[in-house]
Image: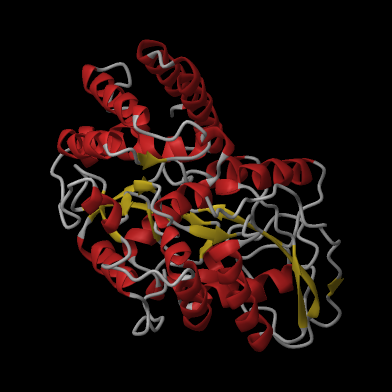
Amino acid sequence: MATKRRVLGTALAVGALAVTAGCGGDDGGGSDGGDGGDGAAGGEVEVFTWWADGSEKAGLDALVKVFQEEHPDFEFVNGAVAGGAGSDAKNVLASRLQTNDPPDTFQAHAGAELSDYIADGQVEDLSGMYEEEGWTEAFPESLLDRLTVDGKIYSVPSNIHRANVVWANPAVLEEAGIDPSATYDSLDAWIADLEKLDAAGKIPLSVAMDWTQVHLLETVLLADLGAEAYNGLWDGSTDWSSAEVTDALNDYATLLEFTNEDRQSLDWPDATQLVIDGEAGFNVMGDWAVAAFEEQDKVFGTDFTTFPVPGTDGVFDFLADSFTLPVGAPNPDGTKAWLSTVAGPEGQAAFNAAKGSIPANTEADTADFGEYQQTAIESYANDEIVSSLAHGAAAPISWLTDITAAVGKFGSDGDVASFQEGLVAAAEKNAG
């Protein structure tokens, strides 16, 4: 298999130099300053992300190019830490924040993931900058609602992603006697075709390490419970010990039986590559995967197809990458300059065209975006929106960590009853 292995590692975090003379650099908050760091400001701006390679790095590079054009007095410093879904980056970031060594800005998933940083007083309120920059008019209300905590906004979204997407290889499906244009109303109908792929000697459903399995789990919960009950898992109105959740976990267990045995040694690009290379029929992954297909000259609708995870049609499982102004940031004016590029239509268009996501800013030009991205734009505008678990929108980091541990344990022992007990315990520990 011609895969592109991710190598875990950290880029050297370069200490940021704040050059603040004559620019009001002692304004550490985001509520008062709004000039985006223009004027006499300058210096290095360390941007901490997990976008270290592939389409994620391509998107970051495109964003940096716009930043350098818009704010030539500032020097971008790449603080990226590799690792799927940011798990390694979050650990490094936590250590830096605890030792009062924040970067100038750091990537975080919009939504509940930010609650831990907010509660610990580690990020500044950016509400004033939103008003001054007009972002409250540029971002959709549904997004602003997910960004707002107790009436304040603490991050600036760079994009919108959809999590509940199945990626398929039509040629592999046809070889197994499956209609490549088929859609599925339920997981049961999909499982019937997974059985055909298994009989044909193909990997029916590719998956990777634990976080991708959490991603798969959330889409199964959404499919079986429906949007309202899925949302209830996070606000306490749905009981994690219920029979409905048990049924969903049994479906998840069935799906896991159709996955590749080497899943724990892979990250998401490897699992996606199995579909690209014709070794697997299906993969459930967020729509950042579209760039992996397109960068290998695969054509949407011919070489690969997509559809919502069976049972989730009409629902958009939302996540967004966003950037913050950390408390104690060495160069807050540089941070504001970065945030202005992240939020602006030019930065959003360049970044999302490369990454496979869609702009959060409705003023961004998407006319040249790919065919898949056009479908995502339409879906976000019309579908019911729910928040992703695996990508920080639905639950705080501590809760996601406990769910991930339960998923990892289940991947080893296959005990559904014990799995559900672990999820119940995680909810009791972390909810509300």
What residue is rendered at 26% in x and 57% in y? 170
Task: Answer with the quarter of the image where residue 201 lies.
Answer: top left
Residue 182: x and y, percent?
15, 52
Give the camera-side residue of 243 and 255. 255
Residue lying at 32% horizontally and 49% vertically, measured from the top left: 164
Q: Say how the picture is coloured.
A: secondary structure
Q: Nearer the viewer, residue 376 or 125?
A: 376
Q: Where residue 308 sits in the image (x, y, percent)?
A: 25, 51
In the figure, 164 relative to 366: above or below?
above
| Residue sitting nearer the eye, 19 or 371 | 371
Question: From the viewer's perspective, is 420 left or right of 46?
Answer: left
Give the vertical position of 278 relative to 262 (above or below): below
Front-most of residues 63 and 410: 410
The answer to which quarter of the image holds residue 219 is top left
At 74% across and 60% down in the image, what residue appears? 79
Position of residue 101 measured from the top left corner of the image (x, y, whole percent): 81, 51
Is residue 80 shown above or below 21?
above
Residue 243, located in which quarter of the rendered image?
top left
Residue 219 can be seen, yes or no: yes
Position of residue 321 measured from the top left corner of the image (x, y, whole percent)? 51, 58
> Does the rendering let one see residue 33?
no
